[in-house]
Amino acid sequence: MRVAIVTESFPPVFNGVANSVVRVLETLKAAGHEAIVIAPTTTGKYFNGFRTYKVPSVPLFQFQLGLPNPFVAKILEDFKPDIVHAASPVLLGGQAVAWAQRNYVPSVAIFQTDIAAYAERYGFRALRPYVDRAMANFHSGASINLAPTTEVAEYLRRIGLSNVSVWGRGVDLDLYHPNRKTTEEVSILHKQVAPNGERVVGFVGRLAAEKQVDRFSELFSIPNTSFVIVGDGPERMTLEQKFRGAKVHFMGKQSGVELANWYAAMDAFVHFGTEETFGQTIQEAQAAGVPVIAPNSGGPKFLIESGVSGYLVDAHIPNGFTPVLEALLDNPELAARMAEGGRRKVLDKSWVANNSKLLEFYASAIQSSVLLDPRRLLVA
């Protein structure tokens, strides 16, 4: 296949959208498919052997919003894709989906970022209906729309889309593995942040308001505990000031083996964010054999079976996370059981297994488009 990926996020920017696109490219390369990438950011003319194209963009809610332009249509026309993959489409992705529809090229649109929720959080609640309508427009021309969870799929149908299916995210089961906990590298990290044998509680993710990392202060009353925040973002300075004097260690952005080692150094992983459409770092912690506590809302509800593969907490209860975490830390047997349950929860979610389903969606979209293309009637 010839796949044109049009994405709103791509390296050197690193977030859930960019990470999933990188993993899709790995799958396409391994299967011998051809691909190009069109994005607001790139690391150069090629990425993993695939041609990349950088387009103009403007900042929006701490993201770079790709802008539609004639350059995009020209790239697509020259490449002649068999399918267009729009990752978290907004203006740029919307243009690609519209181009595909006009040219009878099948397209798959992946919903990954809830822009409407961002608008609400950043003080633009009145814009919610307009953002919902815009998102419906960006997605409406796609052959198939893919949502990360059934809850998000219901939202897409609610705003008027009918061609909706569910496609989640994979996780690297080899990189994030419980065996890493016994390595010398992880032992060194643990001692670095817990020199007196404290339990280590951590978070991994972008430090932005919607992640609600500021609520970690609710946990500081738990004795003999040290906290690790892995990630970077616009809220980092504010959080460092708020947590000054507490046993909190900011490790900045980490990736690859270094990130895997930090997961392994944790005795528990806590995520306070109630607005996650999915929650990739929760899956990574589970794969790493770290017991997870997260809110009973959004994506985490579909990643955790409470009491089996972690714990879900009502985030509206003041300090509701504290007794759950304390009970987990004080009971090694319980923690081990939750860690094992979390690992089992993701064993069927390798990136290979996950992306093979995406290729099936590609094939389905291509098959459907052939049947609907009026040009085949002219040929006949």
Image (cartoon, helix red, strand yellow):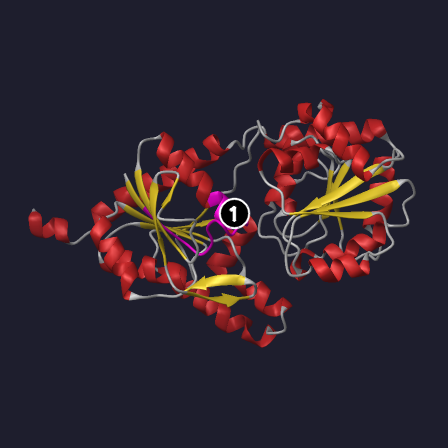
Residue 365 % position (x, y): 31, 45
Magenta includes 19?
yes
Q: Return the residue found at the far bottom.
A: 126
Residue at point 39% right, 49% down? 44
Answer whether residue 87 is visible to the viewer in this image: yes
On screen, residue 24 above or below 273: above
Residue at point 45% right, 42% down? 22
Residue 63 % position (x, y): 52, 61
Residue 355 % position (x, y): 44, 36
Residue at point 21% right, 46% down? 371
**Three-letter amino acid code at the position of disc 1:** Pro
On screen, residue 172 above or below 208: above
Give the side of residue 169 with respect to residue 56, left or right: right
Give the side of residue 139 with respect to residue 350, left or right: left
Label 1 sits on a secondary structure element that is loop
Which quadrant does the N terminus fall into?
A: top left
Which residue is labeled 1 in the image? 148
Q: Which residues are magenta?
A: 4-20
